[in-house]
Image: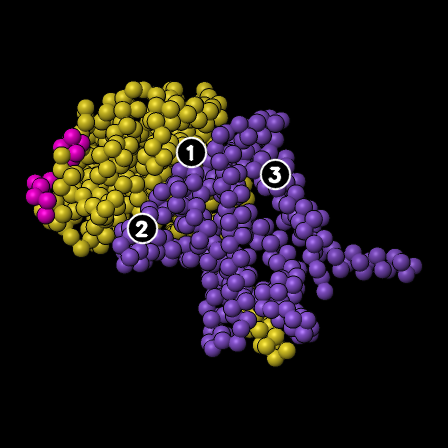
Chain colours: A yellow, B purple
Amino acid sequence: MDQLKLTRRQMLRMMLAGGSVAALAACGTAPAATTTPTDEPAAPAAATGAPAQVSQTGSTVTITYWGSFSGNLGEAEQAMVQRFNESQNDIVVDYQFQGSYEETAQKYTAGLQANTIPDLILLSDVWWFGFYVAGAISELDGLAQQAGLDFSDYEPVLLNEGNRQGKQFWIPFARSTPLFYYNKDLWAEAGLPDRAPETWAEFGEWAPQLIQREGNTLRRSAFVHPDGASYIAWLFQGVTWQHGGKYSNDDFTMTMTDPNTIRAAQFYQDTVRDLGWATLGQDINRDFLGGAAAAMMASTGSLAGLTTNATFPVGVGFLPKEANFGCCTGGAGLAIPNGIPDEKKLAAMTYLAFATNPEQAGIWARNTGYMPVRISTKQTPDMVAFFEENPNFKTAVDQLPLTRAQDAARVFVRNGDQIIGKGLERIIVNGEVPSTVFADIDAELTKAAQPILEDLREVEG
Amino acid sequence: MRERREWLLFALLIGPNLFLFGVFTYWPLLYNFYLSFVSWNFLRPRKRFVWFENYLDVFSQPQFWTIVWNTVIFALFSVGLTLLIGLALALLLNQPLRYRNGARAVLFSPVIMSGAVVAVVWSYIFDPRYGLIDQLLGLIGLNSPNWLGDPAWAMPAVIMVYVWKNLGYAVVIYLAGLQGIPRELYDAARVDGAGPWDRFWHVTLPGLSPVAFFLSVTSILATFQAFDIIKVLTNGGPVIATTTLIFHLYDLGFVSYNAGEAGVIAIVLFAIMLILTIIQLRYLEQRVAYS
């Protein structure tokens, strides 16, 4: 009996501990879930575009800003918000981290249903369009005019992506392109020239010198691909173009079964399976920093973080060519929700103008590696000096004029990115035949595009 | 008169709970049923009624049956291993050993850890190039499989972590069951000349059957809802090797934003759990020897 009592007491104690952990966890999540983004009564339904109300005049306006940056990117973002808040007395920006791009979009979707939406939101390349066709984000031209913001100094490649029928809905902020990253120490060890490969064929010759095998295990790969969840479909976009293929046409007809698109997929499969010098990793930055992969393609937005954290000199270069050069833009921009009071919209636009002004865009670019979204930023003395000291950053900016916007299948079709990503995983991981898989993907994308096309016809006529 | 007052008291007592259940359980259940018949992406103002189109779409996808199979494998192995290893450990920890209490605490500690934390730690342990398992296998001259990157190994990896995390709970419940078996039965068995094996087979095991029954019901229901470990460890991958029904539901609902098809999966899960519970209550309970 003695034993029984002891165990019960122990068990109770354990359960109590478990319970309090659960309770703590619940406390931790509760505020995020129930956050009211404004200090006023809930805004009217966003999607319906109800009339805006001005409830405050002549006093401080507080706006809520939902973003997706953590780590060193989050610190850079917080610092910018702080600089803005300290620079004036009319507007207070409350920056709230929401998780990844996907989680931010999820929360915004839920927020629209619950009428708790922010006043400014960071949306990634694959998300803004869905909210645009749903009527959930505001047209920005009028607001920009009121805030005295002129769009002519923005990088046209980046600005035009957020423009529909001559109206601006999405302003470039943390915009990136893929870069070819390489580990200079491993390059030197293999006796390779200190530069990124010009072509994939050239890299194919280098790769065997970079890999390290132990039995059947690849201890070190020459190159690492991300998985679907980490946007392999973004990096593969440029590779399809390099092979002369594409995901889709502008009118949303899919071209996944185009022989050149399939050729690109075959190449990806070969790098991992037949040639065996590449791997598919869950966390490519971890593999690269840990020396488990000698090279990778990754966002310019990782440049600052990788340079700081690497124990080796990091090299970058343009993406390798195949039949031709191909590189897309990516990253995130800012949008202002619909259905919030006009004064909040204007306050959000004021912050947006600050965050993308030539000086701030420069600070942001230097702290992160994202593109300076303003043309004049590149000529500021700070930026010129920085480029001289950090030629890697210059490479990213130099590649920008050669980039173009992504195909509709990935950025305009809801979940298109993940559909293509899962297809690539089937080809690379399962070793399925690329033409078969991409025929499936073509059909799936075509089906997923239907509701968007219907909505688009309604919105744009 | 008195009856009315009793009714009032009755309503007063169950009212608050019924209200909460209604709002947070029954209403979502009904609403989900409705959603499974519409085409909706959470954003469009209109929901288009499509009858059984979502059901046909879901059931005609070849991946759906792979996912059902994954769910069955995951549930079967997770529950089976938890019950078996849990029983063995409980029998061991029921012996008067030194440091027994410490061992029990250690064994139970993963249960109170967050699933996400457990998964992150294990993702390092599983790494085929610098993970702990690779280091250990290296001592005997073996290479680690690519646990989380190889479709053949990912499910065993997820099951291992899930069993490791939940084993302590089964052990504690088993221990409680073991201590609830009257000593007299063992004494009587001994007098009748039963050896250790006979005592285990004829006294311990029947005595534990209510506990094992309870564990099997709760564990199966829990595995069908297991999400955190899969989300963090493999995100349902590689490809769909570790996608279970509940993960598929999340994928369809909150990645693809297909409310209708996610609703169908929720109905399927609901039906499976209902059937399992009925089977377990009907057939298994008859064989359980309650003292």
Disc 2 or disc 3, which is closer to the eye? 2
**According to the image, label 1 marks what residue?**
A415
Kind of element beneath mark 3: helix
- Number of residues whose C-alpha sits closer than 10 Å to that of mark 3, classed few (under 14), some (14–19) or many (20 or more): some
Q: Residue furthest right?
A: B1
**According to the image, label 3 marks what residue?**
B267
Kind of element beneath mark 2: loop
Q: Is residue B86 visible?
A: yes
Q: Chain of mark 1?
A: A
- Give the magenta range: A189-204
Q: Chain of mark 2?
A: B
Q: Quadrant of the N terminus of chain B?
A: bottom right
| Residue B290 in the image, given as x and y percentages of width and height | 71, 61
Which of these two is toward me, A70 or B84? B84
- Number of residues whose C-alpha sits closer than 10 Å to that of mark 2, classed few (under 14), some (14–19) or many (20 or more): many
Disc 1 or disc 2, which is closer to the eye? 2
Q: Amino acid at mark 2?
A: Ser
Gap in angstroms between the C-alphas marked 2 and 3: 40 Å
Kind of element beneath mark 1: loop
The mark found on residue B144 in the picture is: 2
Residue A303, above or below B1: above
Q: Residue furthest bottom?
A: A2
Residue under the image location 58 percent in, 50 percent down? B220
